[in-house]
């Protein structure tokens, strides 16, 4: 019997969110990803302990929306140009690690007594690493743009593409499996898939650029359209015989080649993370503590394989390709855990009837162990490398030729990041460019951005108040961040985000009132710009000299 009965679904979700916030705070204190905290919340409020979760339909709906947003945001990152230029190391490492981990993991799972289909699901689940967790940890360490960081992000993208293809195949197989004519069903699915891709290609070429350019006049409307677009394609995909996840992913790809993808992705990241909370809580609520006790042995065995085997595979491949042992080691540690996609894949297998809840529980237990331990491996990767350095030379060639050819630095694509391209900001951009400075302009008005791009200046669409968007900019390369936006709340939000990021360059903000200047000075601004006062003083000096 539940310890506390909550009949009101609104009240149930309110209590759930409060507990999730508390568990999230504990996860931060332990330097653990929030995913672990959310799964533990599900276990706590599920039938195994407190038994509070009764509104399963509502939570399941929010969980499905979260998965759709996850796939949509992943699709947004897969710019077609990026896919063509991933590079040999990302493809070789991503594909090689997936293939070897799947094969070895399959036989290991069979040795642990799993049935062939269950062993296949477990083996595939072990191959995928968490893009969300790894990019967050690398960003916190400011290593996203290091050589090993760029390689890691590259093969994570390859993994994301592979997991989507696997889910498409499983969805097709699941639909075909209940049909009397398997070949006919698969053929119809193939035709529908081709028609869907051709339709997306047509929309990307002729309709979406115009629609987005018009909607971008209102940032809120652009976000609403993006969510509606993702949900519409999820439903369309399911209607055609595929899964909702596939449709949401394709919806993201359809917007990935537009100039608005960074702004959309940054704003939807928060919504994605909020909705995914319900997926992980729901997942934890389905776990039965009693059954997990029997799976601790297999879970630890599989976790050791992920924690040790996956990095070794990456180091061997990168060593053969001509990279140093240290680069292979630092990149390899990023695959020492399984992904949120592994849990999604397991949930899909349960839905299709291929595996039972006990196998999903095993995958989840491996996720809890590997995500928890790998977080510390990545955080303290350089400290771990020092005692292992001489042993890791075994994984590199005598001459690591690829790193000698590799440009280990990152091109300084922005000396100054300038927010606001109105009259004052636009003139400032023009004059800074004349000083041979590389300036990246940012504005929330899509028409202004397009106009500056046509003039040959580098400008992007985005919101200065959106912290997720700011993290997509080359802040680590910029010497100055300048805001020509006079609103106090916007500048305070910008300064707070820069402080949270650890930006060590100079910060300049614009004000119209002296009282705002004092507040911004106390908040970390290095330079205060008074457009009207500065212009009047310059005009007075000009008249006096005449």
Image: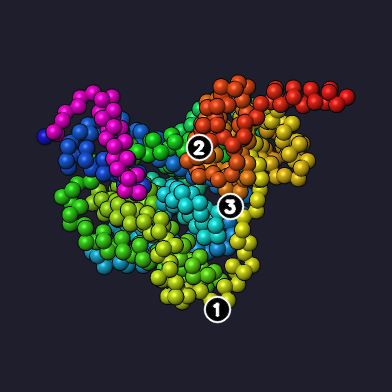
Question: For numbered disc 3, what is the local secondary structure?
Answer: helix
Where residue 101 appears, x then y in whole percent? Answer: 39, 64
Dot 2 or dot 3: first in sequence order is 3
In the rendered view, would you say 263 is above or below 33?
Answer: above
In the rendered view, would you say 462 is above or below 436?
Answer: above
> Farthest front residue?
544
In the rendered view, would you say 154 is above or below 489?
Answer: below
Nearest the viewer among 396 and 384 is 384
> Farthest left residue?
1
Q: Nearer the viewer, mark 3 or mark 1?
A: 1
Q: Is residue 353 left or right of residue 77?
A: left
From this viewpoint, is residue 324 visible? yes
Question: For numbered disc 2, what is the local secondary structure?
Answer: helix
Name the residue tied to disc 3: 83
Q: Residues within 10 Å of mark 1 (few under 14, many from 20)?
A: few
Residue drawn at 14 percent across, 34 percent down: 2
Dot 2 or dot 1: first in sequence order is 1
Q: Nearer the viewer, mark 2 or mark 3?
A: 2
Dot 3 or dot 1: first in sequence order is 3
Name the residue tied to disc 2: 497
Q: Is residue 6 magenta?
A: yes
- The numbered dot on residue 490 is none
Name the residue tied to disc 1: 398
Residue drawn at 21 percent across, 40 percent down: 44
Where residue 342 appears, x then y in whole percent? Answer: 37, 51
Task: Tell me where residue 298 sits by quadrant.
Answer: bottom left
> Farthest right residue?
546
Q: Nearer the viewer, mark 2 or mark 1?
A: 2
Q: Residues within 10 Å of mark 2 (few under 14, many from 20)?
A: some
């Amino acid at each position: 019997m539940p310890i506390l009965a909550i009949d009101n679904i609104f009240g149930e979700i309110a209590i759930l969110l409060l507990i999730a916030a508390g568990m999230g705070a504990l996860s931060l204190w332990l330097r653990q990803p929030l995913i672990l905290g959310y799964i533990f919340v599900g276990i706590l409020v599920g039938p195994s302990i407190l038994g509070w979760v009764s509104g399963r339909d509502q939570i399941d709906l929010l969980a499905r929306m979260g998965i759709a947003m996850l796939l949509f945001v992943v699709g947004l990152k897969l710019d077609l140009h990026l896919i063509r230029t991933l590079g040999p190391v990302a493809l070789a490492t991503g594909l090689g690690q997936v293939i070897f981990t799947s094969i070895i993991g399959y036989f290991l799972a069979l040795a642990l007594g799993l049935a062939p289909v269950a062993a296949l699901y477990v083996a595939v689940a072990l191959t995928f690493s968490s893009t969300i967790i790894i990019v967050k940890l690398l960003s916190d360490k400011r290593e996203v743009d290091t050589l090993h960081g760029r390689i890691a992000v590259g093969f994570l993208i390859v993994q994301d593409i592979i997991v989507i293809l696997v889910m498409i195949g499983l969805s097709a197989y699941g639909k075909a499996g209940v049909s009397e004519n398997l070949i006919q069903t698969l053929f119809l699915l193939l035709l529908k898939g081709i028609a869907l891709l051709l339709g997306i290609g047509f929309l990307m070429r002729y309709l979406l650029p115009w629609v987005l350019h018009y909607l971008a006049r209102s940032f809120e409307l652009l976000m609403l359209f993006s969510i509606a677009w993702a949900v519409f394609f999820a439903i369309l995909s399911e209607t055609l015989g595929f899964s909702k996840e596939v449709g949401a992913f394709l919806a993201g790809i359809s917007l990935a080649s537009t100039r608005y993808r960074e702004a959309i992705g940054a704003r939807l990241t928060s919504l994605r993370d909020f909705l995914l909370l319900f997926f992980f809580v729901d997942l934890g609520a389905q776990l039965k503590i009693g059954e997990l006790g029997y799976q601790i042995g297999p879970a630890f065995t599989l976790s050791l394989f992920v924690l040790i085997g996956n990095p070794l595979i990456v180091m061997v491949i990168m060593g053969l390709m001509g990279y140093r042992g240290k680069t292979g080691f630092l990149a390899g540690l990023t695959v020492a855990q399984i992904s949120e996609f592994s849990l999604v894949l397991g949930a899909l297998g349960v839905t299709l009837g291929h595996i039972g809840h006990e196998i999903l529980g095993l995958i989840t237990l491996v996720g809890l162990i590997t995500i928890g331990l790998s977080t510390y491996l990545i955080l303290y990767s350089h400290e771990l490398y020092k005692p292992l350095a001489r042993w890791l030379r075994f994984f590199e060639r005598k001459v690591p030729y690829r790193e000698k050819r590799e440009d280990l630095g990152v091109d300084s694509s922005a000396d100054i990041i300038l927010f606001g391209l109105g009259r004052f900001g636009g003139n400032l951009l023009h004059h800074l460019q004349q000083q041979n400075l590389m300036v990246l302009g940012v504005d929330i008005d899509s028409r202004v951005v397009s106009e500056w791009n046509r003039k040959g200046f580098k400008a992007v669409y985005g919101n200065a108040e959106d912290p997720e968007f700011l993290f997509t900019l080359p802040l680590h390369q910029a010497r100055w961040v300048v805001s020509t936006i006079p609103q106090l709340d916007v500048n305070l939000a910008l300064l707070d985000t820069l402080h949270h990021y650890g930006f060590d360059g100079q910060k300049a903000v614009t004000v119209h009132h002296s009282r705002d200047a004092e507040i911004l000075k106390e908040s970390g601004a290095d330079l205060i710009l008074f457009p009207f006062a500065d212009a009047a003083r310059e005009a007075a000096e000009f008249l006096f000299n005449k």
